[in-house]
Image (cartoon, helix red, strand yellow):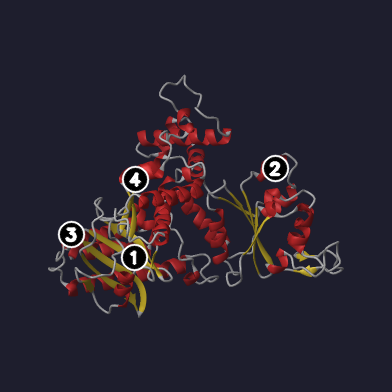
């Protein structure tokens, strides 16, 4: 076990330098590799406790989408049994409790036949779980439980120290309790989403108005929920209003309220969304659809912190944190005269851009894991996995519908895969315990290539893509691929790449950061 403790010492040293749990993936993997070098397991996971769920932070012998899955203890009795066990918990080969990793250890969907785990606790508080799984019964007979218990105790201490350092190092640690985080929080792999997450943590505890940009389907509402959960308003209900769905003649009343008799049909007083959101967060979705005639009134509310319901002679103070959301380029809308410039600047006190899924491919399998787990529960399966060809198809498609398209694609694929696995017994048809999704089930176009891929052709004369896209998108895509290739040919040396491209090193770094290459 010497190598295990050496790896653990490396981890502790890195944590003292301010590294977080999510950035320690390589070291956690090293710890598991040292365990598997000693213990004959086919799969191993290190999971962290997260409000009634367990979330893998390191795994061996399992597909990458496992990192996107949150294992609720209420849905996984074997994990719950490990958590409740005071010592190393080993299950009998004929244990009826389903294993959370049944069907994930190989492409034959083989069930786990030897399983053991140990809860990681610190001062009586659950920190996480260490699991070992094997396909062969009796494979764990030689394991020294006392030795495994000692290793687990060290792991629990390392996890706890990491959590404390994260809380201490957070700019907002005095403003919120991390136990309030959503159990469906995703720890992103892509640099673009990690930067966004850091910006969210920075602005959430403040009272600054946030303008959230992003294409349709990128997951903007998830970011709004996270902003709210990390804010001082988290104990109050997040209030959502879709500006595009409000009838134009009722928008003012819906937002600011009215008094009885203020207009024909106003038979009683009505509280508007701003009044409902007092002391809380108000999400103004599709803010770009707000009519020009109403924009000055919204601007006044933001500036003065007061609303005046229709038919009322007195203004009413409100304390509302505004998060405006749009899939439009509001700066372009201002230029076109469709959006007020002063309101735009008020709303964009802290702008955030949610990147398109095609620009953060490292997150595709994370998201897929989350959707697979949702469908597994919905379809009452022991497990739902992706074949390697399906993984490749997911990562090869350019996802014009973004995260929403990925979610719907996997839901349809899960149903198709399930339909092919029923037994032939017409009286009592039953699906197999685990189901595998193939490329055919996904039903993605065979020409997965993004039309933008043709913008960097092998034949320099062929500069016309198969399908036209926005000029900015095409330019960004071209620059991203061009710089990526130049970096690869210069050993990821940014200074050498800048010289090769005859550009300033600082400018190249800034461009690379904007394009998600850093």
Task: Compute the Cα span from label 2 to label 3.
Answer: 60 Å
Taking the view exactly as shown, the residue that stands out farthest to the left is 142
Q: Which residue is mark 1?
A: 47
Q: Which residue is mark 3?
A: 37
User: Of callouts 2 and 4, which one flags the residue occurring earlier in the amino acid sequence?
Assistant: 2
Depth check, front residue: 192 or 145: 145
Q: Secondary structure at mark 2?
A: helix
Mark linked to residue 333? 2
Q: Look at the numbered discs 3 and 1 and tell me whether their residues touch, using CB distance below 8 Å.
A: no
User: Of callouts 2 and 3, which one flags the residue occurring earlier in the amino acid sequence?
Assistant: 3
Residue drawn at (54%, 57%) of the image: 223
Task: Compute the Cα span from label 1 to label 2.
Answer: 46 Å
Q: Secondary structure at mark 1?
A: strand
Q: Look at the numbered discs 1 and 2 and tell me whether their residues touch, using CB distance below 8 Å.
A: no
Task: Compute the Cα span from label 3 to label 4.
Answer: 32 Å
Residue drawn at (56%, 56%) of the image: 221
Q: Quadrant of the C terminus?
A: top left
Looking at the picture, how far across and down is residue 56, in whole percent?
A: 35, 62
User: Of callouts 1 and 2, which one flags the residue occurring earlier in the amino acid sequence?
Assistant: 1
User: Of callouts 3 and 4, which one flags the residue occurring earlier in the amino acid sequence?
Assistant: 3
Q: Which residue is mark 4?
A: 438
């Amino acid at each position: 076990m010497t190598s295990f403790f050496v790896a653990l010492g490396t981890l502790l040293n890195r944590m003292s330098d301010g590294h977080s749990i999510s950035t320690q993936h390589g070291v956690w993997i090293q710890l598991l590799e040292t365990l598997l070098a000693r213990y004959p397991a086919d799969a191993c996971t290190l999971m962290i406790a997260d409000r009634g769920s367990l979330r893998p932070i390191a795994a061996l012998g399992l597909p990458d989408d496992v990192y996107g899955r949150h294992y609720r203890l209420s849905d996984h009795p074997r994990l719950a049994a490990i958590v409740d066990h005071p010592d190393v918990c080993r299950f009998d080969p004929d244990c009826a409790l389903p294993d959370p990793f049944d069907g994930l250890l190989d492409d034959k969907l083989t069930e786990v036949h030897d399983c053991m785990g140990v809860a990681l606790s610190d001062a009586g508080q659950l920190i996480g779980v260490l699991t070992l799984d094997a396909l062969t019964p009796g494979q764990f007979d030689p394991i020294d439980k006392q030795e495994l218990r000692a290793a687990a105790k060290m792991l629990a201490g390392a996890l706890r120290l990491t959590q404390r350092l994260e809380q201490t190092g957070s700019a907002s640690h005095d403003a919120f309790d991390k136990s309030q985080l959503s159990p469906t929080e995703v720890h992103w792999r892509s640099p673009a989403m990690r930067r966004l997450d850091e910006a969210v943590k920075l602005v959430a505890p403040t009272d600054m108005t946030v303008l959230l940009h992003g294409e349709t389907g990128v997951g903007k509402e998830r970011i709004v929920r996270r902003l709210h959960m990390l804010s001082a308003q988290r104990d109050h209900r997040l209030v959502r209003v879709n500006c595009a769905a409000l009838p134009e003649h009722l928008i003012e009343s819906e937002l600011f309220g009215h008094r009885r008799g203020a207009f024909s049909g106003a038979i009683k007083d009505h509280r508007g969304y701003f009044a409902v959101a007092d002391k809380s967060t108000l999400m103004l979705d599709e803010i770009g659809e707000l009519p020009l005639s109403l924009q000055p009134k919204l601007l006044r509310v933001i500036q003065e912190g007061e609303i005046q319901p229709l038919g009322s002679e007195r203004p009413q103070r409100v304390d509302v944190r505004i998060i405006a959301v749009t899939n439009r380029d509001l700066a372009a809308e201002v230029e076109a005269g469709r959006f007020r410039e002063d309101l735009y600047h008020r709303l964009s006190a802290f702008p955030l851009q949610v990147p398109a899924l095609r620009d953060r491919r490292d997150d595709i399998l994370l998201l897929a894991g989350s959707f697979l787990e949702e469908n597994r529960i919905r379809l009452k399966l022991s497990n739902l996995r992706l074949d390697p060809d399906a993984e490749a198809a997911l990562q090869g498609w350019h996802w014009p519908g973004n995260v929403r398209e990925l979610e719907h694609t996997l839901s349809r694929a899960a149903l198709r895969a399930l339909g092919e696995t029923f037994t032939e017994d017409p009286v009592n048809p039953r699906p197999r315990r685990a189901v595998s999704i193939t490329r055919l089930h996904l039903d993605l176009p065979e020409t997965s290539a993004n039309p933008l891929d043709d913008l960097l052709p092998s034949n320099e004369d062929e500069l016309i893509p198969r399908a036209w896209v926005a000029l900015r998108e095409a330019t960004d895509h071209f620059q991203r691929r061009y710089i990526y290739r130049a970096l690869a040919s210069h050993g990821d040396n940014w200074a050498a790449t800048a010289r090769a491209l005859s550009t300033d090193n600082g400018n190249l770094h800034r461009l690379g950061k904007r394009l998600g290459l850093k």
